[in-house]
Amino acid sequence: MQENIWEKEYRDPKLVTLSDEALGSIKDFVRWLRKDQKVEMVNKKILDLGCGNGKNSIYIADQGIGNEIVGIDISETALKHAVTLAQEKNQENKEARVKFIKQNIGSPLPFPDSDFDIVLDVTSSNSLNENEREIYLKETHRVLKSGGYIFIRTLCKDGDQNAKNLLKTNHGKEKDTYIMPEFGLTERVFSKEDFIATYSPFFKILHLEKETHYTKFKDRSYKRNFWVAYLQK
C-alpha cells in the first residue's frame, strides 16, 4: 500500500521536492560534523534511508574524496531520479561511489555489521508501522560503525495544530498516526518525550531541535513541524 503511494507521488509529485539542492538542515549537519566533531568528510560510507532522488547523500559525498553512497528507497521512480542526479554530479566528483537499492527501510538490510560511517533518515521512517520501526532501529544500529553518526528528520507533534487536527479527524491504527487526506499515506508524529524514548535505547542523542516549514498541497499551505536530530552509536 505505502509502496504504491510513494510510486505515484514520485511520478506526479505533490509533496516531495525533486530539486537537486540538499536540505539546509543537511548542510548544517555537515558543518556540525566538521566543526564540533572534527570529522573529515573523506572516505566515508553513507547510508541514505528513503533516499528519494538522492540529493542529500550526494551532497555529503561531494564534500570530500573517496566517499561512498548507498541509497535505499521503496519507489522505482525515485531511484531513477537518484541515478540520474548521481550521474550528473559524478562529473564533479569522480571519486564518489554510488549504489541505489529498491527496498523498504523497515526490513532487514543487506549489509554487514558496522558497515557505515553516516546514516541519513530524512523524513522517511515516520511512514513505517511499529513492527517496521522496530526492525529499522535494530538494523540501523547494527550496520552503523561504533562512533558513527545518524541524521534524523521526522515529524513533530509538539506545537503542530495541523497534525493534532489530523490525529482527531483521520486517526490511523497505531499510536500518534494519521492518514493524510487525498493522499492516503499514514504518518507517525512524535512528541519530544516520545522521540527520546524511541531512539535513546539505541543511540546517544547529541542534538535535538524543532524546525517549522510550510508544505503546499492542492493550493493550500500547511504548517509542519519537524524534529532534527544528530545521533551517535
Image (spheres, rainbow, N blue to C red):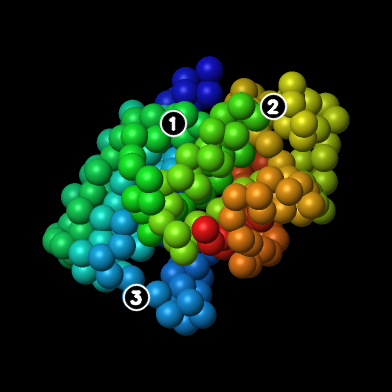
Residue at far top of view: 1
Tag 1 residue: 108
Nearer to us in this view, 44 or 147:
147
The residues tagged by marks 3 and 1 sit, at their Cα atoms, a distance apart of 29 Å
Q: Amino acid at mark 3?
A: Glu
Q: Quadrant of residue 187?
A: top right
Tag 3 residue: 40
Tag 2 residue: 179
Marks 3 and 2: which is nearer the front?
Answer: 3
Whether the residues at callouts 3 and 1 have beta carbons within 8 Å, the answer is no
Residue 189: percent from the left, percent from the top?
71, 41
The residues tagged by marks 2 and 1 sit, at their Cα atoms, a distance apart of 25 Å
> In the structure shown, which secondary structural element does the residue marked by tag 2 occupy?
strand
Q: Quadrant of residue 170?
A: top right
> In the structure shown, which secondary structural element does the residue marked by tag 3 occupy?
loop
Residue at horizontal 53 percent and vertical 40 percent from the top: 138
In this picture, residue 83 sits left or right of residue 144: left
In this picture, residue 172 sits left or right of residue 202: right
Residue at horizontal 73 percent and vertical 30 percent from the top: 178
Residue 118: percent from the left, percent from the top?
41, 58
> In the structure shown, which secondary structural element does the residue marked by tag 1 occupy?
loop
Could you tell me if residue 197 is visible in this image?
yes
